Amino acid sequence: MNSVSTVELNGFHVSLVPFGDQHITETYVGWLNDQEMSKIILSAETTTTLEECRAYAESLILSNENHFFAMIANDTKEHIGNFRLGPHDKHNDRIQLGMMIGNKSYWGRGIGSEVVSLGLNFAFEILNVHKVFLDVREDNLGAIRIYEKNNFFHEGVLKEHVKKNNRFYDLVLMSAINPGLN
C-alpha cells in the first residue's frame, strides 16, 4: 500500500509516521470496540472487525486526498493512536483533521495537543492550506480544549446532529486559519 504521506512528523513525546499494514492490529480494533472510546469517537461502534478496520485504513492509505498517520510514542515506540488530515479540498484550500488516541494510558498527558500542533504545522507549512477544520461532539470537552489550545476557533454548532447510544448530540464545528497566509 502507498500513502500520500511519506513524511514523518516528530514531536517531543510522539511521532506521526505514515500508517501502514503493520498498524492494523487487534489492539487498534480493540480501541474502536472499547465502550469508553465509542462514547467520544463519532464513527466508533462497538462491533468493528479487523476486516472492517483494514478496509477503512486501506481506503485512507490509497486515497490521494488523505494523509493518514500512526501515532508512535517516542519512549516505547508503541502505536498509541491515529491522525488524519483529509480529505484535502484543493479547490477551496482546506483540509479536515481527525485524531484518536486509542491507548488510554496516554490520555491527559499533552499528547493530543502535541499531535494537533504537528498536524497543523504540516497542513500550513508543507501542504500550504488556508484552513484546517473539524467537528467534535459537544461532550468531548478534552478534545475541544486541545483544539482551543492550538488556536482553533468555534465556527458554530449543529444542533442534535449526531445520534449515538440512543441520544442526539450537538456537533461543534471548529477551524484554524493559516497565519502565514493572512
Image (cartoon, rainbow, N blue to C red):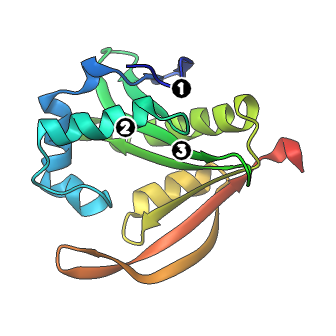
Q: Earlier in the sequence, mark 2 or mark 3?
A: 2
Query: Of the residues shown, which amino acid type is indicated by label 1?
Result: Val
Q: In the figure, is residue 93 to the left or right of 105? A: right
- Residue 166 % position (x, y): 17, 80
Task: Calculate the distance from the C-alpha at mark 1 to the C-alpha at mark 2.
Answer: 12 Å
- Residue 80 % position (x, y): 30, 30
Name the element at disc 3.
Answer: strand
Q: Are marks 1 and 3 in contact (CB under 8 Å)?
A: yes
- Residue 103 appears in the figure: no
- Residue 92 appears in the figure: yes
Q: For mark 3, what is the residue?
A: 86
The one nearer the camera, 71 or 62, is: 62
Query: Of the residues shown, which amino acid type is indicated by label 3?
Result: Gly
Residue sitting at 64 percent across and 59 percent down?
A: 175
Q: Earlier in the sequence, mark 1 or mark 3?
A: 1
Residue sitting at 39 percent across and 28 percent down?
A: 71
Q: Which mark is residue 59?
A: 2
- Residue 124 % position (x, y): 73, 38
In the orientation shown, which residue stands out farthest toward the bottom?
A: 159
Residue sitting at 71 percent across and 28 percent down?
A: 126
Reply above or below: 17 against 57. above
Query: Of the residues shown, which amino acid type is indicated by label 2?
Result: Ser
The one nearer the camera, 51 or 43, is: 51
Q: Earlier in the sequence, mark 1 or mark 2?
A: 1
Name the element at disc 1.
Answer: loop
Identify the image quadrant of the N terminus: top left
- When asked about the image quadrant of residue 52, the answer is top left
- When asked about the image quadrant of residue 136, the answer is bottom left
Discs 2/3, front:
2
